[in-house]
Image (tube, grey):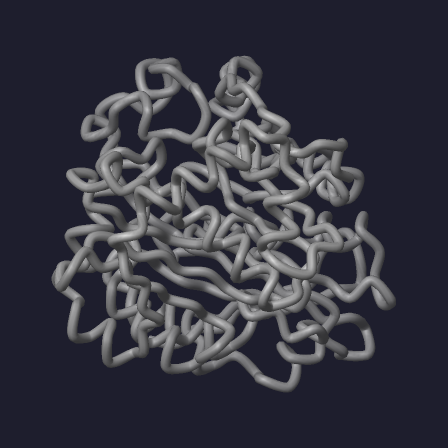
């Protein structure tokens, strides 16, 4: 059942409203904040996630208004619940070890209210109009709204409030959350390739040192038997069982797998966003052995989910081929940046990607537990990794 809560923030003149369904969101107000029409903030995208993933995730939304009743900010939250005794230490991002599972959340159901997107890496949980409010006001009100929301009888009370993930350019703003008892920590880096003045893929290869250019040619030779097909929404439907198996295979090897994508989501995303959502299938003869997805966001190509049959991965260099194909796609879309996400830092660096720090913020609902959380969070450190530089000259 739809519910709304309208309350006045104690720290400023902002008011805010909660919504527990995309259908109730006032489109005009929402779109007035999402002025650049970012896909991950768009109502069609929100609709797809809610319709296909709400069985395991509770979606909620907040809109903030100023004294003139103008929408100045919004937040997207995703609440999920898991049982800690089902977790292994590597189910958490970064190398947390078993510290948190043993000392703070052992043998209990854990609910996490995430301001962000469980299915994308980046700042896709909160947006505010910088011309109408400043960072201090924005994050102060957001903290108040989420903490009040977490205590509401209308929702499952979360054990933790989590903000994910912020880029270094936003740290000076997002650190405002630390003034409200949120603990910051850095997670595994996001590997990002800044595209240079490459006209063709051959130009890209020519900019590499011999060792890495030879490596690339070896990958294409080993992967030559593969056929790459651009999937339509109907193709996704036709191969949904194979896609599900390939995706599950990757999740089994993932460090962080608390939230699982639904194959129906892929189909709906392709239907809605067409050329802005890319889905490529990799075939060995008639067998689908891998897939990759990506979003085209203005001047950024954001690699998203993949699936691989690891029985064929080494022989046909499937994953490495995917990475080079991402570079080709980025060049064809004329974007400035290719974001490859976390993990596999070494292999991603061999194609020219560089590490970029990402920061999260967490707060326990209980004040006492939140105090205990501080020393535990300080133990969190990103995974160690090595970086290769494949280019003849240092790329910016």
Q: Out of 240 and 76, give the one closest to the viewer.
A: 240
- Residue 176 can be seen in this image: no
Q: Position of residue 337 (x, y in %)?
A: 66, 53
What residue occupies the far bottom of the structure in this picture? 28
Question: Is 238 placed left or right of 153 in the picture?
Answer: left
What residue occupies the far right of the structure in this picture? 131
Q: Quadrant of the C terminus?
A: top right
Q: Is residue 81 above or below residue 142?
A: above
Residue in the image at 63% along x and 31% along y: 209
Q: Position of residue 172 (x, y in %)?
A: 80, 39
Q: Is residue 393 above or below residue 296?
A: above
Question: Is 150 placed left or right of 111 in the picture?
Answer: right
Question: Is 90 placed left or right of 45 in the picture?
Answer: left
Q: Is residue 348 above or below residue 240?
A: above
- Residue 36 can be seen in this image: yes
Q: Position of residue 16 (x, y in %)?
A: 64, 67
Q: Quadrant of residue 279?
A: bottom left
Q: Out of 340 and 70, give the one closest to the viewer.
A: 340
Residue in the image at 23% along x and 37% along y: 315
Q: Out of 21 and 153, give the one closest to the viewer.
A: 21
Question: Is 170 placed left or right of 153 in the picture?
Answer: right
How many discs appear? 0
Residue in the image at 20% along x and 47% along y: 248
Q: Quadrant of residue 96?
A: top left
Q: Out of 183 and 41, give the one closest to the viewer.
A: 41
Residue in the image at 57% along x and 16% along y: 378
Q: Position of residue 10 (x, y in %)?
A: 73, 53
């Amino acid at each position: 059942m739809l519910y709304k809560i309208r309350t006045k923030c104690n720290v400023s003149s902002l008011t805010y409203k909660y919504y527990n369904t995309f259908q109730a969101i006032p489109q005009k107000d929402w779109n007035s904040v999402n002025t650049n029409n970012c896909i991950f903030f768009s109502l069609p995208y929100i609709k797809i996630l809610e319709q296909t993933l709400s069985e395991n995730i509770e979606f909620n939304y907040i809109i903030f208004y100023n004294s003139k009743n103008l929408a100045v900010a919004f937040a997207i939250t995703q609440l999920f619940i898991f049982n800690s005794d089902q977790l292994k230490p590597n189910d958490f991002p970064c190398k947390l070890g078993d510290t948190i599972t043993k000392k703070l959340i052992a043998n209990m159901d854990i609910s996490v209210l995430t301001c962000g997107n469980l299915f994308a890496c980046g700042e896709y949980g909160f947006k505010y109009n910088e011309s109408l409010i400043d960072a201090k006001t924005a994050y102060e009100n957001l903290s108040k709204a989420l903490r009040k929301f977490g205590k509401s009888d209308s929702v499952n009370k979360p054990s933790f409030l989590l903000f994910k993930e912020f880029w270094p350019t936003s740290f000076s703003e997002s650190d405002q959350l630390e003034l409200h008892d949120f603990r910051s920590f850095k997670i595994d880096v996001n590997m990002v390739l800044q595209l240079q003045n490459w006209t063709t893929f051959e130009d890209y290869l020519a900019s590499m040192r011999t060792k890495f250019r030879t490596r690339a040619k070896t990958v294409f030779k080993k992967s030559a038997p593969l056929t790459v097909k651009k999937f339509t929404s109907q193709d996704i439907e036709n191969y949904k069982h194979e896609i599900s198996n390939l995706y599950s295979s990757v999740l089994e090897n993932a460090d962080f797998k608390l939230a699982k994508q639904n194959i129906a989501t892929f189909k709906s995303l392709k239907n809605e966003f067409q050329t802005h959502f890319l889905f490529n299938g990799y075939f060995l003869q008639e067998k689908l052995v891998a897939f990759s997805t990506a979003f085209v966001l203005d001047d950024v190509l954001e690699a998203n989910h993949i699936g691989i049959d690891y029985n064929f991965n080494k022989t046909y260099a499937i994953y490495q081929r995917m990475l080079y194909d991402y570079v080709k796609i980025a060049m064809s879309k004329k974007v400035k940046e290719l974001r490859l996400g976390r993990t596999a830092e070494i292999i991603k660096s061999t194609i020219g990607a560089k590490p970029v720090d990402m920061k999260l913020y967490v707060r326990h609902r209980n004040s006492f537990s939140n105090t205990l959380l501080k020393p535990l969070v300080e133990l969190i450190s990103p995974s160690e990794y090595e970086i290769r530089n494949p280019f003849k000259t240092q790329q910016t």
